[in-house]
Amino acid sequence: MEDFNQLAAPGYPIFLGSEFEHPPIDKARFHILPVPYEATVSYQGGTGLGPAKILEASWQLETWDGYSTPCEQGIYTHPPVNVKGKGAKVIKNIAKDIQKIVKMGGFPIALGGEHSITYGVVKGLLDAGIKDIGVIQIDAHADLRDAYLGDKYSHASVMKRVVDEGIPVFQLGVRALCHEEVAARKKHGVYHLDATELVPNNITSIDLPKDFPTNIFVTLDIDGLDPAIFPSTGTPVPGGLGWYQTLALFESVVKQRNIVGFDVMEFAPIKGFHAYEFSAAMLVYNMMGIVERCG
């Protein structure tokens, strides 16, 4: 990382920068946007360190993901979003950066950071003029509280902000939710296949409802996967999705609709355990590969 050309910003290496020079911004399909925001975490912290550690670990990846070479379509790593401030201000900054990426024809990939970030990403897609959009959420939690600890921009309220925009949501892998969130699911018609159905039955493919929007954004909270794979998250819950199951579910939805972006949230590095950082980077790259082949 001594070559400044291989840095998105001080302390932020570019994704897979060990393998290629940073392409011109207008020549890349995939646009990585680091969002090191951490303000409302309710258990263990560390998600603010997630984006930099994922980018650093990506230097150890193979360019061939086992099926194709996604980096050949170009990966541009942006400087991290300005996360000074809190709540609405940060959401606005995220939305502005996402809108710029979409307007230039790029495919946005946001790296968190806490899950409240996703509302800013979705707002950016809307501001860029993308219509008829739905969100696929892979998560241990429903995140449908209207507010948590009095904060409407909490990581526990992010999907409530999304459905309040009138955006359909399909939740996968949820296994921790409260009565308020059960009611919110019913009120807003939130589709869901929870972990209690997906995991014991090893379901790896779903059929989206016929009326689900044409354009989809996928938000993946690291805690959607089982903590045996990713203990490196702020709010781990046992009984989560497996590695191959997660990728297969992602592929099944990408094949059915036009994917307009995705994010990977809530990765909280554990000092000295590089396997989790590498796994997070590999997850992001494998998802890029699926988009390249199927999207």
Image (cartoon, grey):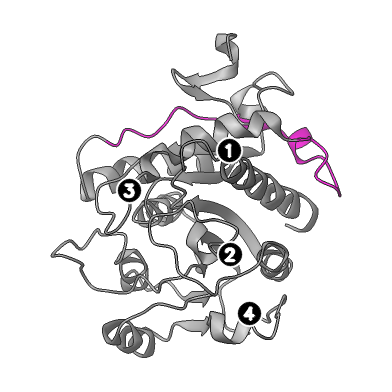
Residue holding disc 4: 199
Mark seen at residue 274: 1
Quadrant of the rendered structure where residue 81 is? top left
Front position in the image: 36 or 271: 271
Residue lying farthest top?
3
The relative height of residue 137 versus residue 6 in the rendered view (above or below) is below
What amino acid does circle 3 point to? Gly
Which span is picked out in magenta? Answer: 62-83
- Tell which circle, 2 or 4, labels the residue nearer the N-terminal end: 4
How crowded pointer 4 is (Cα within 10 Å; few <14, some 14-19, many 20+) is rated as some
Residue holding disc 2: 215
Q: Nearer the observer, disc 2 or disc 3?
A: 3
- Tell which circle, 3 or 4, labels the residue nearer the N-terminal end: 3
- Tell which circle, 2 or 3, labels the residue nearer the N-terminal end: 3
How crowded pointer 1 is (Cα within 10 Å; few <14, some 14-19, many 20+) is rated as some
Q: Check whether the beta carbons of the residues at disc 2 and disc 1 lie within 8 A of each other.
A: no
Residue holding disc 3: 45
What amino acid does circle 1 point to? His
Q: Which residue sits at x=33%, y=74%?
A: 144
